[in-house]
Image (cartoon, helix red, strand yellow):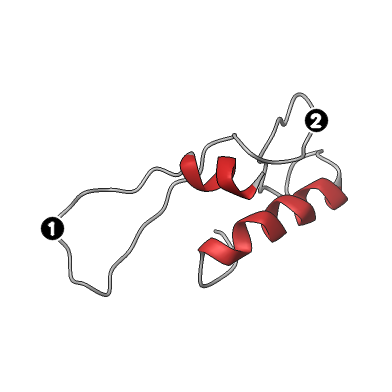
């Protein structure tokens, strides 16, 4: 699943300093069920807290901090 997740990232191609990075996730590669399918990272909606935690755990190896 981690491979699917990494392949779905959107990364900008922009002129920025070498220490500036950005990453946009899609809904592909997570564990949430409908209507939050699949990679819901938002803990402010009615998705199961366990699913949100698992999705954030899947994302963690690819980002230096918690998602915002």
Tell me the residue at 57%/46% (across/down). 3
Label 1 neighbour load within 10 Å: few <14, some 14-19, many 20+: few
Extreme residue in the left direction = 15
Q: Residue furthest top?
A: 35
Task: State yes or no: discs 2 and 1 in contact (Cβ < 8 Å).
Answer: no
Which residue is rendered at x = 39% and y = 43% of the image?
Answer: 10
Mark 2 nearby-residue class (10 Å; few <14, some 14–19, many ≥20): few
Q: Quadrant of residue 32?
A: top right
Number of disc labels: 2
> Quick one: label 2 or label 1, which is nearer the N terminus?
1
Query: What separation in Å lies between label 2 and label 1 (alpha carbons)?
Result: 37 Å
Q: Residue pushed farthest front?
A: 3
The quadrant holding residue 17 is bottom left
Q: Where is residue 42 in the image (x, y as percent from the top left)?
A: 67, 47
What residue does disc 1 label? 15
**On screen, 38 above or below 21?**
above
* Residue 57 locus on image (x, y percent): 71, 60
Q: Mark 2 points at which residue?
A: 33
What label does residue 66 carry, if any? none
Q: In this view, does 63 lie to the left or right of 52?
A: left
Quick check: 61 left or right of 43?
A: left
Up/down of 6 relative to 62, above or below: above
Q: Horizontal placement of 9 versus 5: left or right?
A: left
- Residue 18 % position (x, y): 21, 72
Name the image quarter holding the N terminus: top right
Residue in view at x 75 percent, y 24 percent:
35
- Secondary structure under the numbered disc 1 in the rendered image: loop
| Residue that appears at 44% across and 47% down | 24
The local secondary structure at tag 2 comes to: loop
Judge by depth and name the residue closer to the eye, 3 or 67: 3
Kindly indicate the quadrant of the structure image that contains residue 21. Answer: bottom left
């Amino acid at each position: 699943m981690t491979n699917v997740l990494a392949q779905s990232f959107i990364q900008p191609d922009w002129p920025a300093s070498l220490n500036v990075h950005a990453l946009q996730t899609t809904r592909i590669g997570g564990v949430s069920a409908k209507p939050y399918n699949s990679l819901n990272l938002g803990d402010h909606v009615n998705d199961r807290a366990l699913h949100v935690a698992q999705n954030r755990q899947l994302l963690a190896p690819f980002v230096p901090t918690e998602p915002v």
